[in-house]
Amino acid sequence: MNCGAKEMAWMADTYRILKGDQDINATACVTGKPLAMDGIDGRTEATGMGLYYSAIKFLNTDFYLKKLGLEKGIVGKTAIV
């Protein structure tokens, strides 16, 4: 938590040093690595996108909205994250 690509690269590099390049987990031992270290394009945005899609799903599900007394949709709503 609160680690950037640089810190994740350090952890991945340390894992490779300790376990060796041939270890099956060497590439996937951490997430959030830079692209140059086999990271995934879009990783920086992934958490925010997950939150967005979760909010949209929640705000369009009658079961939850009825319990909270809210109307469907995101228009006119505010939130603190």
Image (spheres, rainbow, N blue to C red):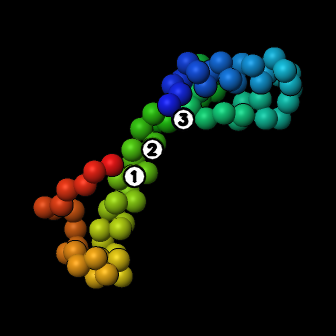
Query: Neighbour class for label 1 at 10 Å: few (<14), some, many (≥20)?
Result: few
| Residue shown at 65% from the left, 18% from the top | 10
Q: Amino acid at mark 1?
A: Leu
Query: Neighbour class for label 3 at 10 Å: few (<14), some, many (≥20)?
Result: few
Q: Are marks 1 and 2 in contact (CB under 8 Å)?
A: yes
Question: Looking at the image, which is closer to me, 63 or 23?
Answer: 63
| Residue shown at 23% from the left, 79% from the top | 69
Q: Are marks 3 and 1 in contact (CB under 8 Å)?
A: no
Q: Nearer the viewer, mark 3 or mark 1?
A: 3
Reading the image, the residue beneath label 2 is 47
Secondary-structure class at tag 1: helix
- Residue 60 pos. (x, y %): 30, 72
Q: Amino acid at mark 3?
A: Met
- In which quadrant of the rendered view does residue 63 lie? bottom left
Query: Neighbour class for label 2 at 10 Å: few (<14), some, many (≥20)?
Result: few
Q: In the rendered view, does 19 fall on the left or right side of 52?
A: right
| Residue shown at 28% from the left, 82% from the top | 66
- Residue 68 pos. (x, y %): 28, 76
Quadrant position of the N terminus in the picture? top right
- Where 59 sits versus 21, above or below? below
Q: In the rendered view, does 49 fall on the left or right side of 4?
A: left
Q: In the rendered view, does 37 fall on the left or right side of 24?
A: left
Reading the image, the residue beneath label 1 is 51
Sequence-wise first label, 3 or 1: 3
- Where 73 sits versus 67, above or below? above
- Residue 58 pos. (x, y %): 35, 68
The Cα atoms of the two marked residues, 1 and 2, are separated by 6 Å
Secondary-structure class at tag 2: helix
Reading the image, the residue beneath label 3 is 1
